[in-house]
Amino acid sequence: MTDTLFQELELELQNGTSKKGHPFRYCTLGTVGLGATARLRTIVLRKVSEDLQLVFYTDRRSKKIGHIKENNTVSLLFYHPKKLVQLKIEGSATLVSDTEELKKYWSGIPPANRKDYTTTSAPGSPISNPDSVEYLEDKNHFAIVEIEPSKIEYLKLQRPNHLRILFSKEDGEWNGSFLVP
């Protein structure tokens, strides 16, 4: 039974990157840097590989990049409101440094969306009003983050009993065990 549910969660994650309007397109990323406070923000899931490596884009000057450099253990939270399925994913985040790979992904971003990575000031910097954001012409701060999951917790809210399974990756294999919901 756990194998079937693991296949379901793999499919839902893949659909998050390929099906318009899928609720797994957006998820919450949690990081903890050197401070003791968890930092949460919504990210856009861009890619899921066959071995479940998850990819998102960001501005390399963002605070999440600093947190990942301080502590690369991250969490992701997904929720599917129609299926009543929640996924909690724990893993290690890595900043992609290969310039050819960055160029390849950058070329696939529509020109209108590239401005998200070309502001003159870092994300979170104070501005006088939303119309005063300035953009760079020939430089970008585009970054790719890859997450290698080590644990995935699946929760299905259903009656008569909720279903909760912890999948752990050991020696390259995913193993599932049931938990009390």
Image (cartoon, rainbow, N blue to C red):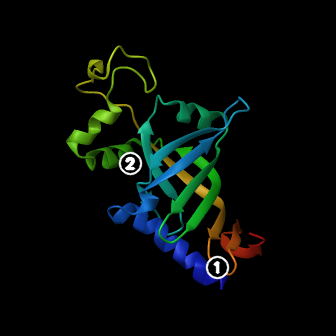
Residue 130 — which label? none
Percent position of residue 134, x then y: 28, 20
Determine the image quadrant of residue 173: bottom right
Residue 159 higher or lower than 152, as above or below = below
Which three-letter amino acid code belongs to the residue tagged 2? Answer: Glu
Percent position of residue 38, x then y: 66, 38
Q: In the orientation shown, which residue stands out farthest toward the top?
A: 128
Density class for disc 2 (Cα within 10 Å; few <14, some 14-19, many ≥20) is: few
Relative depth, front residue between 162 and 120: 162
Q: Quadrant of the N terminus?
A: bottom right
Q: Is residue 143 visible?
A: no
Relative depth, front residue between 108 and 128: 128
Identify the residue at horizontal 38%, vertical 48% (top origin). Answer: 101
Q: Which residue is mark 2?
A: 101
Identify the residue at horizontal 75%, vertical 75% (top origin). Answer: 177
44 to the left or right of 90: left
Q: Are marks 1 and 2 in contact (CB under 8 Å)?
A: no
Mark 1 vs mark 2: which is more N-terminal?
2
Q: Quadrant of the C terminus?
A: bottom right
Q: Is residue 11 visible?
A: yes
Which three-letter amino acid code belongs to the residue tagged 1? Answer: Arg
Residue 159 — which label? 1
Image label count: 2
* SS for dot 2: helix
Percent position of residue 24, x then y: 46, 60
Percent position of residue 86, x then y: 58, 63
Determine the image quadrant of residue 51: bottom right
Residue 154 higher or lower than 101, as above or below = below
